[in-house]
């Protein structure tokens, strides 16, 4: 594993996610309840970026299909709920999901050294 600096504590907040590049991949970082957390900026549904999705209470919503993920664990809490922000009825959710089942997003352990934040990739 390679330890990579992703940000400083002053760059990260609990109000929004910070998109950074780490080891050739896009990562989202945020502070949740005094803890720094990071997940891949790649929704497992179709591989689309989530950085511009709604972020609230430690959960980011994919802006394309409404899937929700906990920023500290990568756990999927809702799977394919909308299409481009428009809520979907039950049967349409299955169509838009394209047979893919609920999947967590990759998460990273964040370590802090002074004001610097690191992940292992």
Image (tube, rainbow, N blue to C red):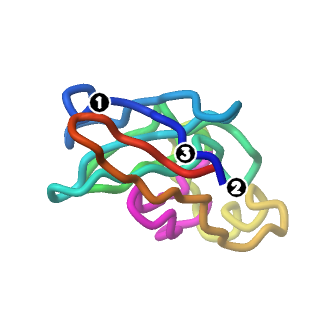
Foreground disc of the pair 1, 3: 3
- Position above or below: 108 against 6: below
Name the N-terminal-most of marks 3 and 2: 3
Across and down, in percent, residue 19 comes to 47, 29
Bounds of the magenta segment: 65-80
Q: Residues within 10 Å of mark 2 (few under 14, many from 20)?
A: some
Q: Residues within 10 Å of mark 3 (few under 14, many from 20)?
A: some
Q: Is residue 116 left or right of residue 48?
A: left
Foreground disc of the pair 2, 1: 1
Name the N-terminal-most of marks 1 and 3: 3
Across and down, in percent, residue 106 comes to 61, 59
Name the N-terminal-most of marks 2 and 1: 1
For image coordinates 52% across by 43% down, the residue present is 86
**What kind of element bears circle 2?**
loop
Front residue of this view, candidates 71 and 7 = 7
Front residue of this view, candidates 21 and 100 = 21
Foreground disc of the pair 3, 2: 3
For image coordinates 16% across by 59% down, the residue present is 33
Q: Which mark is residue 44?
A: 2
Q: Is residue 78 magenta?
A: yes
- Position above or below: 91 against 110: below
**Residue identified by numbered label 1:** 8
């Amino acid at each position: 594993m390679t330890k990579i600096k992703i940000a400083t504590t002053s760059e990260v907040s609990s109000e929004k996610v910070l998109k950074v590049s780490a080891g050739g991949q896009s990562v989202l970082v945020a502070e949740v309840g005094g803890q720094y957390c990071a997940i891949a900026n790649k929704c497992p549904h179709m591989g689309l970026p989530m950085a511009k999705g709604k972020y609230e209470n430690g959960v980011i919503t994919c802006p394309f299909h409404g899937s929700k993920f906990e920023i500290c664990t990568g756990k999927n809490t809702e799977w394919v709920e909308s299409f481009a922000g428009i809520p979907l009825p039950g049967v349409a959710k299955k169509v838009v999901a394209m047979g893919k089942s609920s999947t967590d997003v990759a998460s990273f352990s964040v370590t802090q050294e002074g004001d610097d934040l690191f992940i292992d990739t």
